[in-house]
Image (cartoon, rainbow, N blue to C red):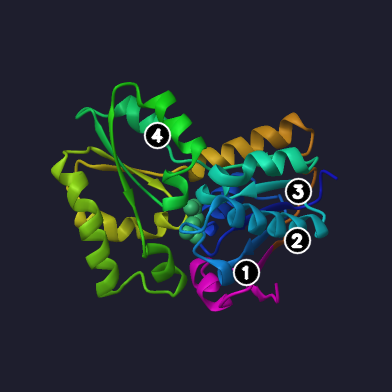
Amino acid sequence: MSNSPIGIFDSGVGGTSIWKEIHKLLPHENTIYLADSQNAPYGPKGKEKITELSIKNVEFLLSKNCKIIVVACNTATTNSIQQLRETYDIPFIGIEPAIKPAALQTKSNTIGILATKGTLSSELFHKTSDLYANGVKIIEQVGEGLVPLIENGRIESPEMDKLLQKYLKPMLDANIDYLVLGCSHYPYLIPKLKTLLPKHLKIIDSGIAVARQTKAILAQHSLLTTSQKESTCTFYSNGNPEILNDLIANEFLATKLQF
Ligand code: DGL
């Protein structure tokens, strides 16, 4: 079992930002990545639908004999991980917006969070932000429309610039000094965000934390691979595999999946 792959899924291509951190930290681990791009975005969908799609993704990864599943999607984690953990007898790693480090380090006592509607309206997100906010003011912003543009390979587009400017304005007006990226698609916007934000403002995401947690949980379950060989990384997409290939720099080629 320890040499079985790590399964990773997202509503689409964004979770590859998490896969990159996992692959960097655990280079000998085989991985299987599933992009459910045909059903992206998950953000505007309700909890029930998000859970139904998450279960379908998990079933696929289990059919590939995965030893652990990383839910590389904040929206799926905050809406469905509890049910996944109750349903399946395998460890799950989730991703949640990095409110805690931002709230601990802010000097202006105000932080911004950009995430999907599904994440920001979830019970789990409210619990986490109440727990860690500690008197810090949190400016929440739904990034409506950002995921579809990324899914369509349109990071560099006038529409993207316009949306980001609109979403950042209330946060900048409120004097945030930390911007939390609460969606695994958004790290691909960092170069663009840096051109739109003042230099002192820090951007944080949860990718490295998720990779570290994956390693810790594998170790705890004695599931770390014993292999020292080069790993096999397999990518599946039920959308346009070319967008996925661009993001993983064509290092491994994604397979088109009927799913
Ligand atoms: N990558 C997903 C997340 O982290 C995007 C959600 C969506 O498809 O709207 O929330």
Image coordinates for residue 15, horizontal then vertical, percent: 54, 56
- Local crowd size for mark 2, using a 10 Å CA cut-off: few (<14), some (14–19), many (≥20): some
Disc nearest the viewer among 4 and 1? 4
- Residue 241 located left or right of residue 104: right
Label 1 to label 2, Cα distance in Å?
20 Å
User: How many marks do you count on the picture?
Assistant: 4
Amino acid type shown at disc 3? Gln
Q: Which residue is mark 3?
A: 228
Task: Report the span colored magenta.
Answer: 234-259
Q: Which residue is mark 4?
A: 99
Q: Earlier in the sequence, mark 2 or mark 3?
A: 2
Amino acid type shown at disc 4? Ile
User: Residue at image x 75%, y 57%?
Assistant: 61
Q: Which residue is mark 2?
A: 60
Q: Earlier in the sequence, mark 1 or mark 2?
A: 2
Residue 245 magenta: yes
Return the mark for residue 252.
1
